[in-house]
Amino acid sequence: MQCKCKETLEAKLKEHVAKSLPEGYEDFDASLQGYGFGMETETMTMISIYQVPYKGQVMVPKKGGDGMKRQKIDTTIRAQYCPFCGKRAVPEGEEESSNA
Ligand SMILES: [Zn+2]
């Protein structure tokens, strides 16, 4: 991501959540989920990316032809823009080419 929304929001959320905690709490550890790292192809540097989970299930025919079995769907889709400020995830012209 090219912006600092994750860091900014995490700080705000921590402040917000901490208000509801009892006095004397310890080991506060929380973060926005879905963020990870990816390779930026042009400069071969690691960049922060945001991935939206896509999960579910589907019934597929068994190989032997005798009935159906449940198959899990578990993948992610990489956000092209920040969901909070709308700024492009990667600079213009440096988009990843693999998911075109
Ligand atoms: Zn942002």
Image (cartoon, rainbow, N blue to C red):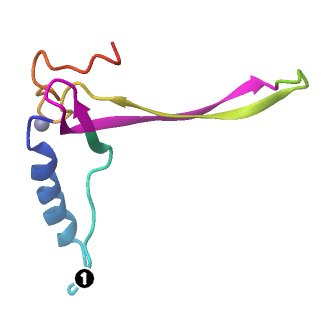
Residue at image coords 33%, 12%? 100
Whether the magenta-drawn stretch holds residue 54 is answered as yes
Magenta stretch mostly in which secondary structure? strand
Ligand 1, seen in the image, is in the quarter at top left
Residue at the image position 25 percent from the left and 21 percent from the top: 96
Quarter containing the N terminus? top left
> Which residue is at a point 32% across and 44% down the rendered structure image?
34
Q: Nearer the viewer, residue 100 or 51?
A: 100
Q: Is residue 60 left or right of residue 95?
A: right
Q: Residue 40 appears at what percent x and percent y?
A: 20, 30
Q: Position of residue 21 (x, y in %)?
A: 25, 76
In magenta stretch: residue 55: yes
Which residue occupies 24% across, 82% down? Answer: 25
In the current view of this chain or complex, which residue is farthest to the right? 66
Front one among 51 and 96: 96
Q: In the rendering, at what x and y percent does residue 61 appear? A: 79, 22
Q: Residue furthest front?
A: 44
Q: Which residue is mark 1?
A: 25
Q: Is residue 18 above or below residue 48?
A: below
74 versus 18 height, above or below = above
For residue 95, what is the image quadrant?
A: top left
Q: Is residue 85 left or right of residue 77?
A: left
Residue density around tag 1, few if under 14, some if 14–19, many if 20 or more, within 10 Å: few
Which is nearer the eye, 22 or 88? 88
Relative to 3, say whether 9 is above or below: below
In the structure shown, which secondary structural element does the residue marked by tag 1 occupy? loop
54 sits left or right of 11 in the view: right
Residue extent of the magenta highlight: 38-62
